[in-house]
Image (spheres, coloured by chain):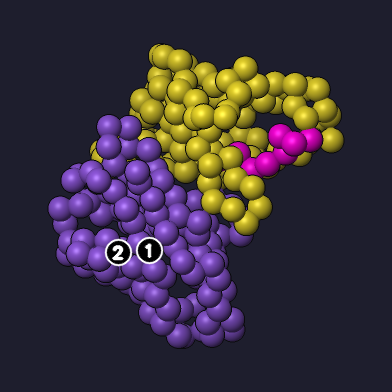
Amino acid sequence: AQKVTQAQTEISVVEKEDVTLDCVYETRDTTYYLFWYKQPPSGELVFLIRRNSFDEQNEISGRYSWNFQKSTSSFNFTITASQVVDSAVYFCALAGGATNKLIFGTGTLLAVQP
Amino acid sequence: GAVVSQHPSWVICKSGTSVKIECRSLDFQATTMFWYRQFPKQSLMLMATSNEGSKATYEQGVEKDKFLINHASLTLSTLTVTSAHPEDSSFYICSARDGRLEGTQYFGPGTRLTVL
């Protein structure tokens, strides 16, 4: 069975703080993909990153960075110097198997206070 | 980037009427599109997988006769909520899979349906 766990339901930080969103996944597939999506109050899901199971290199994109560790089945997302515009619900998702359906975590609501 | 549009963005209808929601991939062809439903403060729930030129595959518990899906072309999928009732009120989101980035789904802006 495939599963994605985002244990943090809500996080509140003050602007300019760094924040890490946790994601732990379960799968028996050897080939799979991991994703992060952002859902601002407008509702649209914005694609942030895709990682395949064979690429454990960490990635940095501006203030965003991702840490993928197969040994702990984790794919954590860090925002450095957070801004109010980062306030949103962030979903971690897993796709694997023949269907490549996305399995979503329950999401983490990030509130960045000015 | 890959852009997916959805229309309408919101709709209010009377109980018993049918509502059609369109999902279009604007700058890529999508052989597979997906329809999700999202309740307030919850995650996305996959309703069905829509494949161009064939019947949709529905998830367990989703009524295929109530939620009609048609994927008539490589850029358009439609979801029709038939005989809508207040319990069908929800946020419906479509996505399209872009084959250029395997496994990746790009999402439309969503449609908020309110059934009175």
Q: Position of residue A26 (x, y in %)?
A: 32, 53
In percent of width and height, residue A99 lies at 32, 32
Q: Is residue A1 left or right of residue A110?
A: left
- Quadrant location of residue B68? top right
Looking at the image, can residue A67 be seen? yes
Chain appearing in purple on the rendered image: A
Q: Please state the chain letter of the residue tagged with numbered disc 1 in the rendered image.
A: A
Q: Nearer the viewer, residue B26 or B88?
A: B88
Q: Residue B60, how many percent across, how many down?
A: 51, 29
Marks 2,1: beta carbons within 8 A = yes
Q: Is residue B30 above or below residue B108?
A: above
Residue occupying the point 82% across, 28% down: B15
**Residue A37 visible (yes or no):** no
**A59 left or right, relative to A81:** left
Q: Secondary structure at mark 2?
A: strand
Q: Amino acid at mark 1?
A: Cys
Can residue A35 be found in the magenta stretch?
no
- In the image, what residue occupies the spot 58% across and 40% down? B37
- Which stretch did the figure color magenta? B86-94
- Chain in yellow on the image: B
Question: Could you give the CA–CA distance between mark 2 and mark 1, rounded to whole angstroms?
Answer: 6 Å
Q: Which residue is mark 1?
A: A23
Residue beneath label 2, please?
A: A74
